[in-house]
Image (tube, coloured by chain):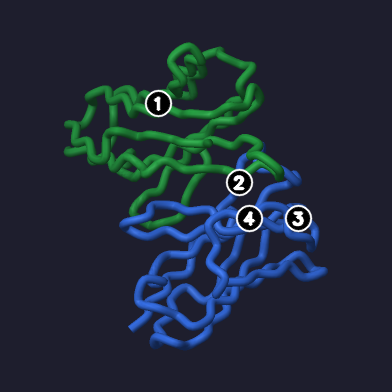
Amino acid sequence: DSGVTQTPKHLITATGQRVTLRCSPRSGDLSVYWYQQSLDQGLQFLIQYYNGEERAKGNILERFSAQQFPDLHSELNLSSLELGDSALYFCASSVSETSSDEQFFGPGTRLTVL
Amino acid sequence: AQKVTQAQTEISVVEKEDVTLDCVYETRDTTYYLFWYKQPPSGELVFLIRRNSFDEQNEISGRYSWNFQKSTSSFNFTITASQVVDSAVYFCALSDSYSGGYQKVTFGIGTKLQVIP
């Protein structure tokens, strides 16, 4: 158990809808990272927050947004969902501000868009 | 630009065989970090090792060993006397600074290892 929690575990929704994925980092970790894992794209970095502020952006679509709250939990919002958004979404956390440290991954949220 | 290449998409070995997973990276930075993560069938990624670009010492942890060679931009991972529990997808990752911003991490496509009893 990495200490990172993600909810929900599974999410099934329809095209055009909006969903929110939630992540709680390990105790003491200030950085939260979001990743998308799909069969064709592999593991793609989406975005990083550190202590409430956005730190780094990867291949995140404009339809997606995230935030980190004062209690350090983070939410990833996906809107106007398309079939291609079906994937496993991982959250990870680390102590430091940069991605030079190891990251601890949550169990993931499997999103299915029908 | 950052790039991580894991040329072996799938490998099958018989239990107790040794197996090496290859990782080749590209970066323009002189300071960078390399990682290996394991993703077992349960799905959760597990950190295995971290190396910074200034430390080329090989590392051994039990049956696992890592060979970092800057001259060939490689960071290979060897499992000795493989076991069925080693069956997983293994990811190599690179963290470096990209132009105009903070560090970010790039993962390879992963190598699926199947250990046959």
Do the residues at pointers 3 and 1 share their chain? no
Give the residue number, with chain letter if any, for mark 2.
Answer: A103
A25 relative to B106, above or below: below
Query: Where is residue A109 drawn, in percent x and y?
Result: 47, 69
**What secondary structure is found at the residue carrying circle 2?**
loop
Do the residues at pointers 2 and 1 share their chain? no
Residue kind at label 3, given as amino acid type: Tyr
**What secondary structure is found at the residue carrying circle 1?**
strand
Give the residue number, with chain letter if any, for mark 3.
Answer: A50
Do the residues at pointers 2 and 4 share their chain? yes
Residue kind at label 2, given as amino acid type: Gln
Query: Where is residue B99 drawn, in percent x and y?
Result: 66, 39
Going 73% across and 53% down the picture, which residue do you hit?
A55
B48 relative to A76, above or below: above
Residue A4 is drawn in which quadrant?
bottom right
Task: Give left or right: position of A52 versus B84.
Answer: right
